[in-house]
Image (tube, rainbow, N blue to C red):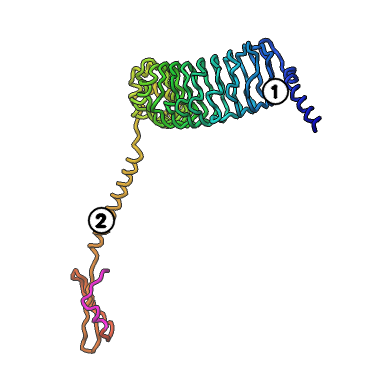
């Protein structure tokens, strides 16, 4: 048993050197990808700027052992099985500018601000396709990520951003696309005074009425959500009045109201509403009559009515924008017609009922002992005598009237 343990220990001690011998140095980079690595080897001799350990089987990231004078600027740990990163694992990588952790199995509840401790020069962090689900308060904090410019949190199944989850004053591009956000918490994004692009496409947003304070935002992407009514004019003027492009492609917007979008913001150059179920009717005449909108790059393709499908609203005339009667009015008109017909039928029946003849019956006894029923119409027509019976039973109906 002791011998077996000794052999295992010997094998483990030799493994990093074996791994390093398989890595390939290519110019200023070292390629250790596709080597079935299960742990990060020792890199105390690392002198390159780029280290690629993608497509391995690494599950845990602990302290990366590199020399104090290492100048690594790009670390690729994508497409592994990483589920845990210990605090300060990257503290020796003071020159690191790009860290790619995409396509792993990291969860938001396991990410803390200390994970990215000492990465004071990191500019790009890629966490795409990790099942984060949520982002804790302070996970991306400017105290540790002071130089961060580009943060990719796309395809992370995120449905919750806690308050101050992202607090990065130098961030320029934030990608939150392909998640499950149903609303945007403006308090989740703080100190974003340099953010120029915010991508919220492919989420479950049903409304956008507030925005974080984004004073230099240039591009707001809201494509492929479930937006029906877009009311962001006030929010844009208040929090993002430098925005140039607003993309609303592939939503569920049917109509557009004059005071809901920032059509009158001077710096706006493009509002894209392509692939929405826009109903081009009389309610949209104001758009084609607005000179400011005509000067901008506004894409509004009609989907309804059928005869205008696929046509750019901005190329239509007022005469072509016609409002159809609302369904409710049609139903009410139909109901009124039915009631009118039913009333007429009722009146006819009443008249017929009033004209119905009434018959009076009388009974008497003749000299021979027989009882006779005498029928007479109320309008003076000839009476008829009918010999019914010699029993007194006819007397029960004496003076009775009935309809015929």
The answer to if 301 sits in the magenta stretch is: no
At mark 1, the secondary structure is loop
Residue sticking out furthest to the bottom: 368
Using the image, tell me which numbered label, if any, was put on residue 34.
1
- Tell me where the magenta segment starts and ends, as one range: 393-404
Q: In terms of image quadrants, where is residue 49? A: top right
The local crowd at label 2, few if under 14, some if 14 to 19, many if 20 or more residues have their Cα within 10 Å, is few
Which residue occupies 51% across, 22% down?
Answer: 140
Along the line of sight, the residue nearer the viewer: 336 or 226: 226
Residue 160 position, x and y percent, is: 48, 31
Residue sticking out furthest to the left: 380
- Looking at the image, residue 389 sits to the left or right of residue 175; the answer is left
Work out whether 138 lies above or below 51. below
Along the line of sight, the residue nearer the viewer: 14 or 99: 14
Asked if one can make out residue 296 in the rendered structure from this viewpoint, the answer is no
The answer to if 399 sits in the magenta stretch is: yes
Along the line of sight, the residue nearer the viewer: 88 or 251: 88
The CA distance from mark 1 to mark 2 is 90 Å
Asked if one can make out residue 267 in the rendered structure from this viewpoint, the answer is yes
Residue 79 position, x and y percent, is: 63, 25
Residue 317 position, x and y percent, is: 36, 23
Using the image, tell me which numbered label, if any, was put on residue 373.
none
At mark 2, the secondary structure is helix
Q: Quadrant of the C terminus?
A: bottom left
**Mark 1 vs 2, N-terminal side:** 1
- Looking at the image, residue 60 sits to the left or right of residue 294; the answer is right
Whether residues under marks 1 and 2 lie with C-beta atoms below 8 angstroms apart, the answer is no
Which residue occupies 62% across, 18% down?
Answer: 75
Using the image, tell me which numbered label, if any, was put on residue 347.
2
């Amino acid at each position: 048993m002791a011998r077996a343990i000794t052999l295992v220990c010997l094998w483990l001690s030799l493994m990093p050197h074996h791994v390093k011998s398989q890595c390939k140095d290519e110019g200023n980079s070292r390629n250790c990808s596709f080597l079935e690595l299960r742990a990060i080897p020792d890199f105390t001799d690392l002198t390159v700027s780029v280290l690629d350990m993608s497509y391995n089987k690494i599950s845990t990231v602990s302290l990366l052992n590199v020399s104090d004078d290492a100048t690594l600027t790009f670390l690729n740990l994508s497409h592994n099985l990483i589920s845990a990163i210990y605090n300060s694992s990257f503290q020796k990588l003071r020159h690191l500018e790009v860290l790619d952790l995409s396509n792993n199995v990291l969860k938001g509840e396991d990410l803390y601000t200390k994970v990215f401790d000492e990465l004071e020069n990191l500019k790009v962090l890629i966490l795409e396709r990790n099942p984060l689900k949520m982002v804790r308060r302070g996970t991306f904090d400017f105290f540790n990520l002071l130089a961060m410019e580009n943060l990719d949190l796309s395809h992370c199944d995120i449905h919750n951003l806690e308050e101050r989850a992202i607090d990065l004053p130098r961030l320029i591009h934030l990608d939150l696309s392909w998640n499950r956000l149903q609303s945007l918490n403006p308090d989740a994004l703080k100190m974003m005074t340099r953010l120029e692009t915010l991508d919220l496409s492919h989420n479950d947003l049903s409304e956008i009425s507030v925005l974080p304070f984004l004073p230099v935002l240039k591009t707001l992407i809201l494509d492929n959500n479930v937006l029906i009514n877009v009311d962001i004019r006030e929010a844009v003027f208040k929090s993002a009045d430098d925005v140039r492009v607003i993309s609303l492609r592939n939503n569920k917007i049917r109509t557009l109201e004059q005071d809901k979008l920032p059509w009158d913001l001077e710096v706006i150059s493009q509002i894209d509403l392509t692939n929405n179920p826009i109903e081009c009717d009389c309610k949209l005449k104001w758009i084609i009559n607005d000179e400011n909108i005509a000067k901008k790059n506004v894409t509004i393709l009609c989907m309804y009515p059928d005869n205008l499908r696929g046509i750019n609203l901005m190329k239509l005339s007022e005469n072509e924008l016609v409002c159809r009667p609302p369904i409710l009015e049609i139903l009410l008109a139909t109901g009124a017609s039915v009631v009118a017909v039913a009333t007429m039928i009722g009146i006819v029946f009443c008249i017929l009922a009033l004209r119905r003849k009434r018959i009076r019956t009388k009974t008497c006894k003749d000299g021979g002992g027989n009882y006779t029923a005498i029928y007479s119409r109320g309008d003076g027509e000839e009476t008829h005598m009918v010999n019914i019976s010699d029993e007194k039973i006819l007397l029960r109906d004496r003076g009775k009237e009935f309809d015929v």
